[in-house]
Image: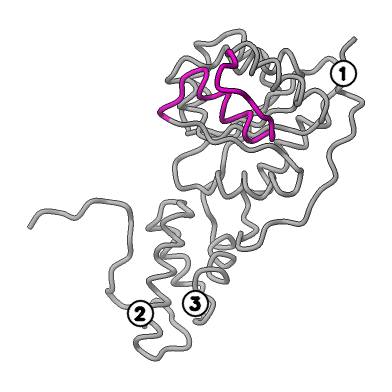
Amino acid sequence: MKQDKSKTQAPPQQAAPAGIAPLANIAVAERAISRALGRGLHQPGLVVMHGPSGYGKSMSAAWVTARNRAYYVQASDFWTKKAMLKDICRALGLQFKPGDTVDEMAKMVVAQLEQSGRPLILDEFDYVVDKNLVEAVRSLYEGSKAAILIIGEEALPQKLKKWERFHGRILDWYPAQPASVEDARELARLYCPHVAVSDCLLEKLVDKARGSVRRISTNLETVQEEALGMGWEEVDLTKWGNRPIHTGEPPRRV
């Protein structure tokens, strides 16, 4: 008889990884994984976090992986069913032989997920959809009843509608949030630690980056480099002047 996963204790939390700013989307990812781990007996265990590229979803995944002793796997454009299972086996610490079949590796993965009670995080899940591997992931879930956090781009919920049996097993959806000024302050501590950045400049960076954590981080590194070169200990919007701010848009032709 299979273990009653609803009574399985959540893995003990670990310290958050260094070098990661505590952004709002980390809280979103934490809520998602906690929802899956704490679900009721008859509730499904798949949860989805989705949002535009650059919103810090993978950073959030790194945080919840460390905090919840989760298994983390990043999907790839090169995945086949066997390549996917090999990568999952590696993440789970499982040894496989060159001659192992897809079915043998799948059974190893299912057994480890079921026995460990640890959640699985599948990042870049759009590749799983594009490679028609969704049903393979569903089979891993059905066999193990593991808590699985799926992370993908903003269109992922619409993409998954095609896979009715998988879609019906999703417990909840968690949209990633655009970066705020509060997030930018946290990023400034990480990427611009030697220069004080005013809120008015942070607001400008957030606006120009259109909520992208990645672009805000890039701009903050540029701000620090420029400020140190100019001998500034602090910088505001007036001092920054008309210096460029990276927006992600390609340069215009002149």
Mark 3 vs mark 1, foreground winner is 1
Q: Is residue 90 magenta?
A: yes
Tag 3 secondary structure: strand
Q: Residues within 10 Å of mark 3 (few under 14, many from 20)?
A: many
For the point 50% across and 26% down, the residue is 156
Query: Label 1, label 2: how many angstroms apart (C-alpha)?
Result: 56 Å
State the image quarter where residue 86 is shown: top right
Task: Give the mark nearest the N terminus, 3 or 1.
Answer: 1
Name the mark on residue 77. Answer: none
Q: Is residue 143 above or below residue 54?
A: above
Q: Residues within 10 Å of mark 1 (few under 14, many from 20)?
A: few
From the image, tell me which residue sits under label 1.
41
Which residue occupies the foreground of this view, 217 or 4?
Answer: 4
Q: Position of residue 244 (x, y in %)?
A: 28, 68
Kind of residue indicated by mark 3: Val
From the image, tell me which residue sits under label 3.
197
Kind of residue indicated by mark 2: Glu
Query: Label 2, label 3: how many angstroms apart (C-alpha)?
Result: 12 Å
Q: Is residue 40 above or below residue 49?
A: above
Disc 2 vs disc 3: Cβ atoms closer than 8 Å? no
Task: Give the mark nearest the N terminus, 2 or 3.
Answer: 3
Tag 2 secondary structure: helix
State the image quarter where residue 10 is shown: top right
Which residue occupies the foreground of this view, 71 or 39?
Answer: 71
Disc 3 vs disc 1: Cβ atoms closer than 8 Å? no
Could you tell whether 118 is left or right of 41 in the image?
left
For the point 54% across and 36% down, the residue is 74
Kind of residue indicated by mark 1: Leu
Query: Label 3, label 1: how many angstroms apart (C-alpha)?
Result: 49 Å
Q: Position of residue 107 (x, y in %)?
A: 70, 15
